[in-house]
Amino acid sequence: MLETRGYRVLTAVGSEKALEIFREGGIDLVLSDLIMPYMDGNELIRRMKEIAPEVPAILDELPLLGIVAAYAAGTTTVHGARELRVKESDRIAVLVQGLRALGGRSAARR
């Protein structure tokens, strides 16, 4: 999806490789899973923010939905996702913050 919009997409198998790629620079956005071997997504993003705090980072399965919704025509509404507000973090609020950092218009309602 992102490649069809002209973005260069880099993938990493595991958090160590992701951090290595990030250190090389040229990254404009990070989409990360939460559960990974070696270090989880929260720790990975914390370390990345120490290197480049200006790079937006979005965590877990919801980011892909957010990116796809940003390119969809009309309004995208997600229902039945209340549990995403009370897991490790408020994932919906983090997604909205990440999309806004990229210039998107998004809102989260309770």
Image (cartoon, helix red, strand yellow):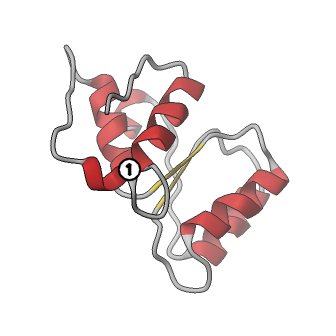
Residue 31 visible from this viewpoint: yes
Q: Is residue 34 above or below residue 53?
A: below
Residue at the spot of label 1: 85
Q: Can residue 1 be seen by looking at this rendering?
A: no
- Picture residue at 63% right of the left edge, 40% below the top: 56
Query: Measured from the top left, where is residue 72 in percent x and y?
Result: 23, 23
> In this rendering, would 7 be left or right of 84?
right
Return the residue nearer the eye: 91 or 66: 91
User: As displayed, is residue 41 above or below residue 89?
Assistant: below
* Res 71 quadrant in image: top left
Residue drawn at 45 percent across, 75 percent down: 35
Horizontally, residue 7 falls left or right of residue 63, namely right
Residue 63 spot, x, y in % from top left: 39, 46
User: Which residue is at a point 28% across and 30% down the rendered structure image?
Assistant: 69
Closer to the camera, 55 or 83?
Answer: 83
Q: Quadrant of the N terminus?
A: top left
Q: Mark 1 belongs to which amino acid?
A: Arg
Query: Which residue is at the far bottom?
Result: 38
Residue 64 position within the rendered picture, expressed as x and y whole percent measured from the top left: 34, 46
